Image (spheres, grey):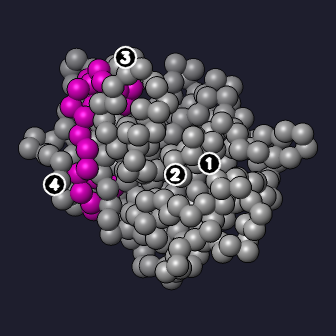
Amino acid sequence: MAAGPRIELAWPTPNTAYLEGKPIETYVQSTASGEAESGLFGCARSGGVQFHEGVDLKPVSRNRQGEPTDPIFAALPGVVRYINPVAGESNYGRYIVLEHPHMQPAVYTLYAHLSATAPGLKIGDPVARGQVIATMGHTSDKGIPRERAHLHFEIGLMLTRDFQRWYDWRGFGSINSHGLYNGMNLMGVDPLDFFNEFRARRVDNFHDYFSRMTVVAKVRIATRTVPDFVRRYPSLLTKEIPMAGVAGWEIKVSWTGLSFEWTPLEAADVAGWRTNEVRLLDVDAEALRKHRCKSVAVLRRGNYVAGKDLETVLQQLFGLR
């Protein structure tokens, strides 16, 4: 698929430190460790074994009570898809999810730990790039100290529109209060890395960014299923889905398990395979060792198989049980 034009992008808080090229300590909020890196995306916490799916951005203004007053801006033009108004119902606290249908792929952005959403903002509203959508806070079901108030910001893709069926099958023992916009159904990419690549003009848009992702493994699966994921994100396909259907897929995945390139397979490509059989090819063992907080591939009897995080993704994408 051809790459599109250069998009327009807004930093989601009033802090200009990133735009001025200052160190991360000036705009990233740390955890209790005091290390700014703990607010970044990735294996950033608990000595590298805890995953953080976003970047935490600190405030630049507070009121007399010490509460943050920073407005939160939509990073891209889009549509409000979800608002969680009840702080205690999610570790995101109050949060907003925007979808950006004019992007390729149509990424979501998520804005969490908000003290309040913009007056009158509701699901289905269109928003402009840079529009005020909320006020920064420290809401969460687990409690965030006021002094560590921040915006948790994500960019990513939704795994499936059949999330509730998977959620019920897993038997978590709690109600899914957030529907499709439960965090377990949203897979983020590194927001700061995207901004860095965009600022350096190495990418102009999300199509460029996904096409440059590092492959940690190729997944082959024998199935006639066409996940709604590729229907919603057709720019991730290497070629069109045949009218006669597919016999399987070859999928390139990142170290988080995000599937960012899809190639439909013919019957000859998976001849002799069992239905829903999964095989991993070209696994980058060194990359796996660098990212201990995610289990994408594990060695069993000399062969790589899907780790627990990749298994979860495949369950949601293909309905595997």
The residue beneath circle 2 is 317
The answer to whether mark 2 and mark 4 are in CB contact below 8 A is no
Depth check, mark 2 against mark 4: the one in front is 2
Q: Residue 125 carries which label?
A: 4
The image quadrant that residue 137 belongs to is: top left
Q: Name the residue under label 1.
A: 257
Segment colored magenta: 67-94
Q: Earlier in the sequence, mark 4 or mark 1?
A: 4
> Is the C-beta separation of discs 1 and 2 under 8 Å?
no
Q: Which of 88 and 279 is in front in this view?
A: 279
Q: Quick check: is 92 in the magenta stretch?
A: yes
**Residues tagged 1 and 3 counted as in contact (Cβ below 8 A):** no
User: Looking at the image, is mark 3 or mark 4 earlier in the sequence?
Assistant: 4
Name the mark on residue 143. 3
Three-letter amino acid code at the position of disc 1: Gly
Q: Residue at x 66, y 36 (%)?
A: 308
How dense is the environment of label 4, judged by Cα within 10 Å: few (below 14), some, or many (20 and up)?
A: few
* Residue 212 visible (yes or no): no
Q: Is mark 1 on a helix, strand or loop?
A: loop
